[in-house]
Image (tube, rainbow, N blue to C red):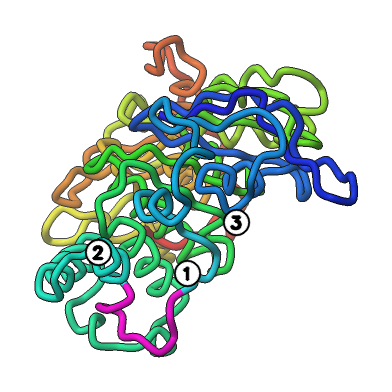
Amino acid sequence: MIRFEGAGKRHPDGTVAVEELDLDVPEGRITVLVGPSGCGKTTILRMVNRMVEPTAGRVLLDGQDVAGLKATTLRRGIGYVIQQAGLFPHRRVLDNVATVPHLLGWDRKRARARAAELLELVGLAPETAKRYPSQLSGGQQQRVGVARALAADPPVLLMDEPFSAVDPLVRAGLQEELLRLQSELNKTVLFVTHDIEEAVRLGDRVVVLREHGRIAQLADPHTLLTAPADERVAAFLGRDRGLRGLGLRPAADVALLPADGVHHGWRLEPDADGRPAAWVRGPERRDAPSFAPAVDSLRAALDAAVLSPAGLAVAVGADGRTTGLASRAAVLAALGAEGGGAPADAPQPDAPQPDGAGAGRGR
């Protein structure tokens, strides 16, 4: 879908932003560009819609050199999402989203109907349409930005650190929303971030860049984390790159223990519907952190086990009822076992934490 052939950008003062980039961005996938500030990520992204004109090489979109396409026509066929949404402050949300359809000649009724449909798609309530951007939270504004980028159903979506200006909790929600949308829409997404955790969470492929847009490594997230190309890539990924891999593997294969009985002095108490209510030890009651093996990652399972006073995460089904218990050792065994499954002799629960430690919040 997108191809860079020896693409480069040299500024008039002689500064080289990007040098001889060769890169294919596959159709219907999320490709993430990640790297330190000043490595050329945004320059590469903006070459696609000609907001930056290459001074060397070519950028091809569906086999066509973008340099030969009219810039305004090109941009109307590409979704573009930036930090802080970039919404028009004087226009209501519905009209912000309908901007590109209007420019493409859609009539007002059709454009507004499409905008309303997209606001619902990105998880915004219908009444949001009548508000102005200043009346929305940062997370809501970013959702509007995504809706606007999708308004004309473009095959390509460019996203330049779109979630970096919101708090971590909202950011995680927006990331989940993007993955949900992508599972339905299958856009060709080129995503820029400086956050390696965001990169491995979102990307089908991750491109780690060095200065001048040079590719240090291009790989799927699992390969990137487990087999970095060299020491510099490993240093950029961080010392906790092994733990990041927990977020890439499903929790479905974690070996579970029965939920009855006493575990290191703690007993799991269910509510009337069979959902985990609390860990109980004598007069003490603590939260019972849980995870859903069918949908959660190993990271969620390990987090719940670490926060549990018994050192055991409570596994729950779609109905929220308890299906078993998972130890930290069983979670790590599922990560290390070939094919992702926990071995039959998965270690038993870890040693208990000291009294008072590990009390956590439920999920």
Q: CA distance from mark 3 to mark 2?
A: 56 Å
Residue type marked 2:
Pro
Task: Identify the residue under disc 2.
Answer: 101
Q: Please rate how many residues cluster around mark 2, counting C-alpha atoms within 10 Å: few if below 14, some from 14 to 19, many from 20.
A: many
In the figure, residue 17 lies in which quadrant? top right
Magenta-colored span: 87-96
Location of the N terminus (image quadrant): top left
**In the rendered image, which residue does mark 1 sit on?**
85
Query: Which residue is disc 3 drawn over?
Result: 357
**Which image quadrant is residue 215 in?**
top right
Task: Name the one closer to the observer, 351 or 228.
Answer: 228
Relative depth, front residue between 237 and 303 = 237
Tell me which label, 1 or 2, sits earlier in the chain.
1
Q: Are marks 1 and 3 in contact (CB under 8 Å)?
A: no
Would residue 26 appear left or right of 110 to someone viewing this image?
Answer: right
Nearer the N terminus, badge 3 or badge 2?
2
Between 264 and 20, the one lying in front of the other is: 20
